[in-house]
Structure formats: C-alpha cells, structure tokens
Image (cartoon, rainbow, N blue to C red):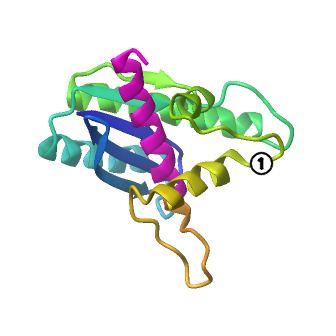
C-alpha cells in the first residue's frame, strides 16, 4: 500500500492506494490550530491512525516549493512550508519506519497524464480531472464551489498515484 501526502500548514491531503486503486482519502484540517507544533502533533496523530488501519509499504510526499514564481509565495511562507514538510517527513519516517520519497507537483501530474495548458491553474485542472473521473467524493459548498480540502485530497491522490507509477517503472 502507498501513502500519498500533500502537505501544507493549513490542510494536509491524505491518500492510501492499493494496486493503483484508492482505498482511503482524507484530509487534516489545521486551519484552526494556531501553534506550528500543535499542527505537527495533529498530523502525527492522524499518521498513527493510518498505520493502525493500513499496511503502508511506501510513502510519497509532494515536494515543497523550491523556487519563486511571479505572484507566488513569499520567502517566509516558503520557509515555513519547507520546515513543516520536514517535520511531517520525519513523523512519517518515525511512525511507519519508512523513508518517504519526494515528488514534485509537475512530475506527479505528468506521471498521471494530467497536462496543464498555459494560462490555466494547475489546481483547477487537477480538480476537473477528478470531477470527471469520480474516483473520490468531491464535496461542494452551498454556493456550488468545491470545498478547499478536496483540492488537497486530489493532490494527495496524484502524488500517491505518481508514486505507484514510479514503483512500476512507468
């Protein structure tokens, strides 16, 4: 089984795959937790729950941003995200006794055959892919918008599936 994680300090997307089939999707909502370390503690609790339910053999984590882009994150935000990614990576290693593998978002989408046309937002294109495929439940707000956490789950599925393809040598 493969665990895919999309890590951020607001919502962590979680996906468990078995033979390229989604077994479980979830998210960890950290938006109401103020302390950086309390957020990390919450993630560790959920990782332990995942371990109690599934025999995880591989962990794939979306690699944190490594460069600046126009209109993107500030240096402070990127540093915080890198730090949190490192903590969750360590927790994953500690909980599962497995070294996580890292995959860039671009590489993960490419492995999954999701192409982003110039001028389109990657998150929207990924969500469109899952709205069409109906591989996991997408929840909407009362205004008809996709719930924010569904984007994180979608990214975790892409990361886990890309990990599956990497392990298959595809």
Relative to residue 131, is residue 156 depicted above or below? Answer: above
Residue 47 coordinates in the image, percent (x, y): 27, 42
Q: Residue at x 61, y 73 (%)?
A: 145
Q: Does the image show residue 34?
A: no
Q: Does the image show residue 128?
A: yes
Residue 111 coordinates in the image, percent (x, y): 52, 28
Apparent side of residue 167 relative to residue 65 in the rendered image (left or right): left
- Residue receiving disc 1: 120
Which quadrant of the figure contains the C terminus?
top left
Relative to residue 1, is residue 37 depicted above or below? Answer: below
Residue 155 coordinates in the image, percent (x, y): 51, 45
Residue 137 coordinates in the image, percent (x, y): 40, 65
Residue 170 vs residue 6, the one in the foreground: 170
Asked if the magenta segment contains residue 162, the reply would be: yes
Q: Residue at x 46, y 35 (%)?
A: 159
Asked if the magenta segment contains residue 79, the reply would be: no
């Amino acid at each position: 089984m493969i665990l895919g994680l999309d890590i951020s300090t607001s919502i962590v997307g979680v996906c468990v795959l078995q033979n390229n089939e989604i077994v479980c999707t979830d998210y960890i909502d950290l938006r109401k937790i103020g302390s950086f370390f309390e957020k990390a503690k919450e993630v560790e609790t959920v990782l332990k729950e995942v371990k109690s339910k599934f025999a995880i053999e591989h962990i794939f984590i979306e690699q944190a941003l490594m460069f600046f882009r126009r209109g993107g994150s500030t240096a402070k935000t990127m540093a915080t995200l890198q730090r949190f990614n490192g903590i969750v990576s360590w927790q994953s290693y500690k909980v599962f006794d497995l070294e996580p593998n890292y995959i860039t978002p671009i590489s993960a989408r490419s492995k999954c055959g999701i192409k982003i046309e110039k001028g389109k937002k990657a998150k929207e294109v990924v969500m469109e892919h899952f709205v069409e495929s109906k591989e996991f439940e997408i929840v909407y707000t009362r205004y008809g918008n996709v719930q924010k956490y569904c984007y994180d789950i979608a990214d975790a599925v892409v990361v886990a599936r890309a990990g599956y393809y990497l392990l298959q040598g595809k």
